[in-house]
Image (cartoon, rainbow, N blue to C red):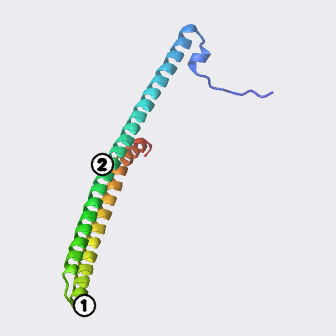
């Protein structure tokens, strides 16, 4: 048989009740510290998800309001067009009214689409920002 040299912690080589109690107290203390860190991280993460959900709720509400404003503007423009169309006296006037209306609506809908897509990007960014901050905070000690 060969002799295997092992290095044992001092607490084990000098076994006594005090050494065992000290080792157990250190273990409990370290476990408590780890639990407190984990608990704090979990609370931070929950706060980040709450902030993200609140940002989504605000954003969706604002998006719906702007979409409804666009709908109202388009509906109003259509009624104005139909009113002017009812007063037209010739086919050339109808074609001119139609052409004018189509050009204005194309421009208005382009602006509305641009506005709504910019708002959607802002909502997405605002939604992700709290979670992104939490992830950066969580992974910072690893870097």
Report whether residue 39 is seen: yes
Q: Is residue 99 left or right of residue 47?
A: left
User: Few, some or many C-alpha atoms within 10 Å of disc 1 (few <14, some 14-19, many ≥20)?
Assistant: few
Q: Dividing the image into 4 quarters, which one contains the N terminus? A: top right
Q: Nearer the viewer, mark 2 or mark 1?
A: 1
Assess whether mark 1 and mark 2 are in contact (beta carbons under 8 angstroms).
Answer: no
Q: Say the numbered circle drawn on residue 91.
A: 1
Q: Give the CA separation, mark 2 to mark 1.
A: 49 Å
Give me the residue at 26% from left, 75% from top: 105
What is the total number of numbered labels drawn onto the structure image? 2
Q: Is residue 91 above or below residue 29?
A: below
Report whether residue 129 is seen: no
> Which quarter of the figure has residue 113?
bottom left
Give me the residue at 33% from left, 55% from top: 123
Q: Is residue 91 above or below residue 112?
A: below
Q: Which residue is mark 2?
A: 58
Q: Is residue 36 above or below residue 57?
A: above
Counting from the top left corner in percent of width and height, residue 75 is at: 26, 67
Front one among 30 and 120:
120
Front one among 136 and 10:
136
Counting from the top left corner in percent of width and height, residue 87 is at: 18, 81
Among numbered discs 2 and 1, the one appearing first in the sequence: 2
Give me the residue at 44% from left, 43% from top: 142
Name the element at disc 2. Answer: helix
């Amino acid at each position: 048989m060969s002799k295997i040299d092992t290095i044992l912690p001092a607490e084990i080589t000098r076994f006594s009740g005090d050494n065992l109690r000290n080792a157990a107290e250190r273990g409990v203390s370290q476990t408590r510290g780890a639990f407190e860190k984990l608990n704090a991280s979990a609370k931070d993460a929950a706060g980040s998800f709450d902030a993200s959900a609140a940002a989504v709720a605000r954003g969706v509400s604002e998006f719906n309001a702007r979409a409804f404003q666009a709908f109202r503007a388009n509906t109003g423009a259509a009624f104005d067009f139909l009113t002017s169309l009812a007063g037209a006296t010739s086919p050339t006037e109808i074609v001119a009214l139609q052409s004018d209306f189509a050009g204005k609506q194309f421009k208005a809908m382009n602006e509305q689409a641009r506005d709504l897509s910019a708002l959607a990007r802002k909502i997405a960014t605002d939604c992700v920002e709290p979670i992104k901050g939490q992830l950066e905070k969580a992974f910072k000690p690893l870097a």
